[in-house]
Image (cartoon, rainbow, N blue to C red):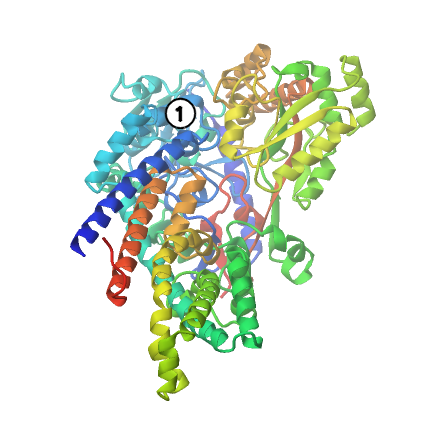
Amino acid sequence: MLTFTVSRVLQSLGVLLVASVFTFSLIFLLPADPARLVAGPSASVQTVNSIRRELGLDRPFVAQYALYLTHLLRGDLGRSYKQQTAVRPLIASRVWPTFQLMLGAVALELLLGLPLGIWAALRRGRWPDRLVMGFAFLGASAPQFWLGLSLVYLLAYGLNLFPLGGYGGLSHLFLPALTLGLGGAGWYARVIRSSLLEVLARDYVRTARAKGLSQSRVVVRHALRNAASPIISMIGLDIGVFMGGVVVVESVFGWPGLGRLVWDAIRVVDIPVIVGVVIFSAVVITLANLLADLVQLALDPRIRYS
Amino acid sequence: MKRFTGQSLMGSSLLGLTLLLGTAHAAPQQGGSITVSYKDDVTTLDPAVGYDYQNWPMEKMVFDALLDYTPGGTTLTPRLAAKMPDVSKDGKTYTFTLRKGVKFHNGRVMTADDVKYSLERVLDPKTKSPGQSFYTDIAGAQAFVDGKAKAVSGIAVLAPDRVKITLNAPNAAFLNIMAMNFAFIVPKEAVAKAGEDFGHQPVGTGPFKLKSWVSGQQLQFERNPNYFMAGMPYLDGVTVKVGLDPSVAYLSLQRGEIDLLGDGIPPAQFLQVTRDPKLKANVFSKTSVNTTYLSLNTGVGPLKDVRVRQAINMAIDKTKILRIINGRGVVARGVLPPLMPGYDKAEAGYAYDPAKAKALLAAAGFKNGFETILYTTSTDPNPRIAQSIQQDLAQIGVKVQLKSLAQSSVIDAASTPKTAAMVWSGGLAWTQDYPDPSDFYWPILSCRSAVQGGWNWPFVCDKALDARAGKADRMVAPAQQAARLKEYASIFAALNKQAVWVPVFHEVRYTMKSDRLVGGVDDLLDPTHFINYERLSVKK
């Protein structure tokens, strides 16, 4: 277990280094000139050149990357070109809202996906099954910006059940979390359905039934525990998927998280913010996957890592 | 020294007129607060740095310049200056007298040293100000920028309330430059205290103070109770909410949660809003001081021939393009927009006439047309407009290949000599920095801007026109202004004959307010400041 953890942590550090090099060089290949974007429209050539020098953008790639890396090792993510403020507190101020949103989305995925998946598995081939599978298909394929705006229009504007966006308590959180989690809920329902169907056909379930246990007891106590195993690693992967999803969902709902921060930064080629968020996300995704592996290891004694 | 009484008299009489008109309506009520929505986060409120339509009016809430304009107008008025400056006979020296006892939000009295500091701060390369080059014509400024001088020799503090600015050469637009946000007066100690975060902790003399700023959520401004203009501002507070998608903001306005749509009316709701008689009363529109055009590179292939460029001017159906943008614009006939001083109403431009265009092409030796490339930004509706141009040009035999790219790539191609034959400027239209026609000449159509990385996309360089514009800019006396504007009109007429652009439209901006917000079109859609927050009020 210890060697496994250590090797995974080392692996993660490697992933982070690669992520930083990759993002940094990708931005270099972009045909966009950050100095010009900082200078804004109608700045003269001299002004743009002067800004380029001040930002250190006239130096070669390797020099810029080396400088960035030495700062990074000291925990300094640099300063935003556009907002003219340090990147680390900027990211720090956006972490909690994004975390809340992801937590809400995971909760809704489980609350919607698990019961629907179980329901479908127990009514296999009948209308509830088809309904759930139809929902899973639609949920997974609906574009999030469309889904988000539709939910806002119907539930917030039409029925006045929720605020029209912005940051706040649970009532503010519900619609963005639902938008983010609906696709995953459908996916979870599918996975739990097929996994449960497989488990329900096993011998030990038949034994449990033969012992005269009630249906709910068989499903919840015996079958579900084994069927839920893929779900745990899916939650770990979800964090990565969500990092992409929050960009859209946060923009639609005006949620002040990392997704909107990076989206705003991409539009103005604010390199320090983009690289900062990518590195931070890489850390979170690697940690989430590591955690999911460890939890699974604890839950399922059959899994062994060497 | 000769005093510029003419301009200041005109300013004060106009001010008197607006005050009179103001009292004719019910006087605005004091108190209350409003909420304004934007999609994007505010980047900075540092007036030396922030330079977009969103932070420009917010900076104006916190800071003041020595000079300002009449609301919605182009007439200069004194602001932090007690009166319009004294100008020397040769037009090179401007002496400003400051208003007495104006205090920064931190309680300190503003002095002439602050004026010198603020201008030097914009020039200092470390500030990375996009406005640096506006001020390099001040004597000694270039030496300061290059690090050869510790101070700008052309800015002299004569007394705590008097500052003298000397230019290298007379420039009729200099006072406009002194009314820009870049010339807002900032207190040195507050900049030193906040360091590089001054843009997030701004301290100025303005009608409002920044109370709080939560990144990604909202900014709150509160009334400056000690503001030097009596009775201003009317509102106790302004909340700027960010992160609202324009469609969501529109729904919030309907619900009464938002008072003003900072990003305007979303395209999807535009027709519904403008047709609904109930909503219409709260919709305002004004032609902006900008021109969206098709740039024709005078150094590339067949476009070198003026007849070809004229033919293209005649072949493009501008009304069809206006339909693509829901009619949110007026047809352009020349470079200057209608609200820009020097605009010539008589300029007819090129009428839509494909037959004549074809004849001109044939005369130029392109009877069977030719192939060329058109660059456009890839954001809607620009690719659709480019397609419309492509169809129009196909009618006269010109086969156009479209290159739809990201904005920065379009700028790169357009500003590299002999690269982009035609560039559609949609999304990158030229908008005034200040209301003076020289701002539509020097940065975009002069020899000095026809360089790699410049904004002169046709790469037109007419030395005779440069000389005429230079001479016009040396006409600084009030009595010469009418002649100066006439000269500029004639310069732009000459450029129109050379057909270096196809001027297509001047955008009309639309915005919408709540029932309770009180403000006229000049306050909600000011061509220079965009929003005059200090003049807005609410019904109680």
Q: Which sits in the foreground, A63 or B239?
A: A63
Q: Residues within 10 Å of mark 1 (few under 14, many from 20)?
A: many
Q: Is residue A129 left or right of residue B387?
A: left
Q: Residue at x 24, y 35 (%)?
A: A69
Q: Is residue B27 visible?
A: no
* Residue B323 falls in image quadrant: top right
Q: Please state, as top left, top right, bottom left or bottom right, where the N terminus of chain B lies in the image.
A: top left
Q: Which of the chains bears the disc numbered 1?
A: A
Query: A54 above or below A247?
Result: above
Query: B453 above or below B41?
Result: above
Q: How many marks?
A: 1
Image position, residue B497 (x, y; %): 69, 18
On the image, numbered disc 1 is attached to which residue? A47
Residue that sits furthest to the top in the current view: B464
Q: Is residue A223 left or right of residue B282?
A: left
Q: Is residue B481 visible?
A: yes
Residue that sits furthest to the left in the current view: A2
Judging from the image, what secondary structure is the residue with disc 1 in?
Answer: helix
Image position, residue A61 (x, y; %): 33, 26
Q: Which sits in the foreground, B329 or A220?
A: A220
Image position, residue A31 (x, y; %): 46, 29
Q: Is residue B8 left or right of residue B213?
A: right
* Residue B30 falls in image quadrant: bottom left
Q: Which amino acid is tagged 1?
A: Thr
Query: A185 above or below B315?
Result: below
* Residue A56 falls in image quadrant: top left
Image position, residue B116 (x, y; %): 30, 29
Q: Residue at x 61, y 20 (%)?
A: B297
